[in-house]
Amino acid sequence: MRTLLIGGRGQLGTALRARLAGEVIAPDRSQLDLTETAGVAAQLDQLRPDVVINAAAYNLVDRAEDEPELAFLQNALVVRHLARAVDAIGGTLVHVSTDHVFGLDGALRQPLRETDLPGPVSVYGASKLAGEGFVRSLCARHFVLRTCGLYGVAESPGKGNFVATMLRLGRQQGEVRVVDDQHCTPTRADDLARAIVELVSGVDYGLYHVTNAGATTWCGFAREIFRLAALPVKVTPITSAEFAAKARRPAWSVLAGERIATRLSQPLPHWTTALAEYLAARGELNRG
């Protein structure tokens, strides 16, 4: 199988490159500029990949409020062109989306299923939802995967994640203030990569929610990071209003995983287990 991996140096892309079998082509932006519509179609026609995995995105959530045109260009319009090009060669497109397509129903407190009505509350979320729509309507063979709280090791410099940020701030400052009214499921990139690899081996196309199991808040996530790393860091819970980010975030981002569970050889682990494995791999887990 020949796979074209877009965003191969990010957190998910790095995990995918370690897991994908067969021929993997992972061009950087200088080799494949997705904004060059004609060039993308020509390259796909020449390469003829069986699977195209789009692990790239504009994910600067707050900055998107000030530059919506760029967010929609990269997360929607580019995706539209890519979906058409993949469909034209009869390939399969895997597109990674986000829990930020939800958030409008702030009172919701049950895991969100693929059939639940989305309602983004930010420019970023709206742009990602638009991209989903293009993939689902323009490419017959598609997998759209919504995930949440992704963290992992990235080959590309500057690709930080919440776990690394908390460890750095905890060591530097000895205390952190973290939002405690946004519910989520932290997801390890390697677990999402495993799900993608298993999905593309079949033909059960469609929309999937893919996260580790369980749920917490960002504050609860931070506390578990410091507990597992045995760092004596003071964690102060704050509200979203106190944090005062430019873009709104969903108050509830817990995604139901029943559909993906039926397609995997084994379920994705609980988020605390995944976190411990990630920290162990980094040499950050306290085994005492």
Image (cartoon, rainbow, N blue to C red):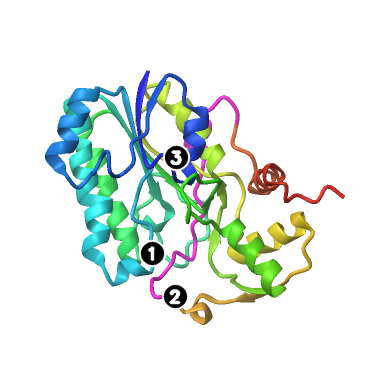
Residue under pointer 2: 245
Question: In the visual, does 22 lie left or right of 81?
Answer: right
Nearer to me, 188 or 167: 167
**Where does the magenta region start and end?**
246-266
Residue 127 lies left or right of residue 210; in this view the side is left
At x 56%, y 53%, the residue is: 185
Residue at 49% from the left image edge and 61% from the top image edge: 252
Q: In the picture provided, is 189 more to the left or to the right than 95?
A: right
Location of residue 265 with respect to 185 vertically, above or below: above
Q: Residues within 10 Å of mark 3 (few under 14, many from 20)?
A: many
- The CA span between labels 2 and 3 is 28 Å
Q: Which label's residue is closer to the chain start, 2 or 3?
A: 3
Q: Is residue 90 visible?
A: no
Three-letter code for the amino acid on which mark 2 is drawn: Ala
- Kind of residue indicated by mark 1: Val
Residue 1, percent from left and from top: 37, 18
Pointer 1 local density, CA inside 10 Å: few below 14, some 14–19, many at least 20: some
Element at label 2: loop
Q: Nearer the viewer, mark 1 or mark 3?
A: 3
- Kindly identify the residue that appears in the image at 68 percent across and 42 percent down: 281
Q: Does the CB distance between marks 1 and 2 fall below 8 Å?
A: yes
Task: Indicate which disc residue 13 carries.
Answer: 3
Magenta: predominant secondary structure element? loop
> Considering depth in this image, is 157 or 261 the residue closer to the camera?
157
Dot 2 crowding, Cα within 10 Å, few <14, some 14–19, many 20+: few
